[in-house]
Image (cartoon, grey):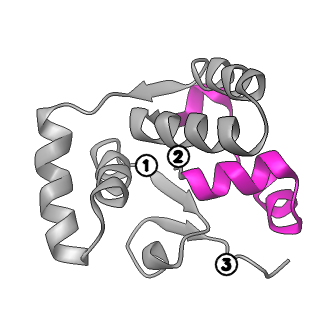
Amino acid sequence: MRVTDTSAWIEFLIGSAIGKRIASEMPANVECIVPTIVQLELAKWLTREISEEAAQKVIADTMECVIADLDTRTALIAAEVGRTYRLATTDAIIYATSQMYAAELLTCDAHFKDLPGVIYFPKGKA
């Protein structure tokens, strides 16, 4: 199982050099966990940068994956990992989700790079 962070989704969707490398790491839908906060970030970014139609299509595609809602258990784990690793709230939720599912986290965000269970692709390095 693998959680894909918003940064990795965006690089994958725009087909950047790093996104092409990430493509080989993207999990199949049944192995892909999508936190609802990632859906929010994707919808916001896609609507702003591309179109509302693109946002609707990508969100529909994510619905074929395992959707991880933000519930109390996730929130409490996010509070703990946020404190421990000094993560912003959204990042703490995403990382907590990966921990709850015992899943790897696929990301391009540097603040995750040294955390356990993270597959990190630095931006700007193809």
Amino acid type of the residue tagged 2 in the rendering: Arg
Q: Residue at x 67, y 35 (%)?
A: 47
**Residue 112 image-quadrant placement:** bottom left
**Residue 8: x percent and y percent?**
65, 56
Of the numbered discs 1 and 2, the one sitting upstream in the chain is 2
Q: In front: 4, or 39?
A: 39
Residue 32, label in figure = none
Residue under circle 2? 2
**Residue 39: x percent and y percent?**
51, 34
**Residue 53: x percent and y percent?**
76, 21
Q: Residue at x 79, y 45 (%)?
A: 13
Of the numbered discs 3 and 2, the one sitting upstream in the chain is 2
- For numbered disc 3, what is the local secondary structure? loop
* Residues shaded magenta: 6-33
Is 11 magenta? The answer is yes
124, above or below 23, in the image: below
Of the numbered discs 3 and 1, the one sitting upstream in the chain is 1
Amino acid type of the residue tagged 3 in the rendering: Pro
The Cα atoms of the two marked residues, 3 and 2, are separated by 18 Å
- For numbered disc 1, what is the local secondary structure? loop
Residue 16 seen by the camera? yes
Q: Is residue 23 left or right of residue 41?
A: right
Q: Residue at x 30, y 65 (%)?
A: 88
Residue under circle 3? 122
Q: Residue at x 67, y 42 (%)?
A: 48
Secondary structure mostly seen in the magenta stretch: helix
- For numbered disc 2, what is the local secondary structure? strand
Residue 103, label in figure = 1
Are the two marked residues, 1 and 2, in contact with CB atoms closer than 8 angstroms? yes
Q: Is residue 6 left or right of residue 123?
A: left
